[in-house]
Image (cartoon, grey):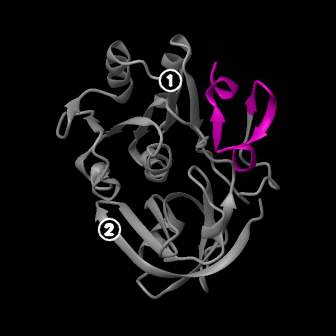
Amino acid sequence: MAAFLEDVKIIENICLGSRYYLLKVKSEKIIKEIKAGQFCMIKPLDNALILRRPISIHNIDKENGVLEFYYETVGKGTKELSTLKAGDIINIQGPLGEGFSINIKDKKIAIIGGGMGIAPLKELIKQVNKENKVVFIAGGRDKYAFEILKNINFKNTIVVSDDGSIGEKKNTVEKLKEILEKENINMIFTCGPHIMMEKVAEVAHKNNIYCEVSLEERMGCGTGACMGCSIETTKGMKKVCKDGPVFNSKEVIK
């Protein structure tokens, strides 16, 4: 699949509370090829930022030519991105990486997101919910992490939080185990903190359920050239940016 460099105009770049932002841009090239689980490398134009920042695709609106990205301001690059306004131009590179398996039918699927791991799951839910039954478990540490759920607007969503300030007071793995006691889940997709995905994968393996995990690693080029995101898998060394970020859990988690 070809990757494009595209200058795109910002439609919205709004703060959802605390350090979380939703970015919407108008795209003509990248939007034609990108799918759930893939990401783009984003760089504001005409500034001192050297490396692009990898940000997963949150939503694809092909009808209106709009791509959405959900991101957290954690460093210089994303803080700079958060200062941009509607009408500003940024440059994005994509689509990059391998996304989730979406060509599935008549399955019961659990999709589990923790914190910023919720970011790539809106588009995934949209695509697999058409011909399957989906339950979405969203976990986070504070109320601001859940503001993005208003943009996802998926009715079969279960919210759990560490302190119980919103949703049930438990973690996503505990909730998954509860669901598995009542329902026959065929597939699990997950994105979030590594320890969460590790525990989710362990539950999946124990119950003989196919599971895909979306990994997050520090990236330099985003195209597999710099080797900065190499990881050890059961099939040898792989690059998260090029071979992932989505992997069969049995390849990366024992």
The reply to whether discs 2 and 1 touch (Cβ–Cβ < 8 Å) is no
Q: What percent of the width, then of the height, locates residue 195?
A: 49, 29
Amino acid type indicated by mark 2: Cys
Which residue sits at x=64%, y=45%? 245
**Residue 147 placement (x, y as % from top left):** 27, 55
- Residue at the location (58% across, 33% down)? 212
Residue under pointer 1: 186
Give the spatial CA distance, label 2 vs label 1: 36 Å
Report x, y in % for residue 191.
50, 40
Q: Find out whether residue 246 is within the magenta segment.
A: yes
Q: Is residue 13 left or right of residue 4?
A: left
Amino acid type of disc 1?
Answer: Asn
In front: 181, or 20? 181
Q: Mark 2 sits on what residue?
A: 15
Tell us which disc is closer to us: 2 or 1: 1
- Quadrant containing the C terminus is top right
Residue at 30%, 53% in the rendered image: 153
Q: Is residue 31 above or below residue 170?
A: below
Pointer 2: residues within 10 angstroms few (<14), some, or many (20+)? some
Q: Which residues are magenta?
A: 232-254
- Rendering coords of residue 28 (x, y %): 61, 78
| As drawn, 226 above or below 183 | below
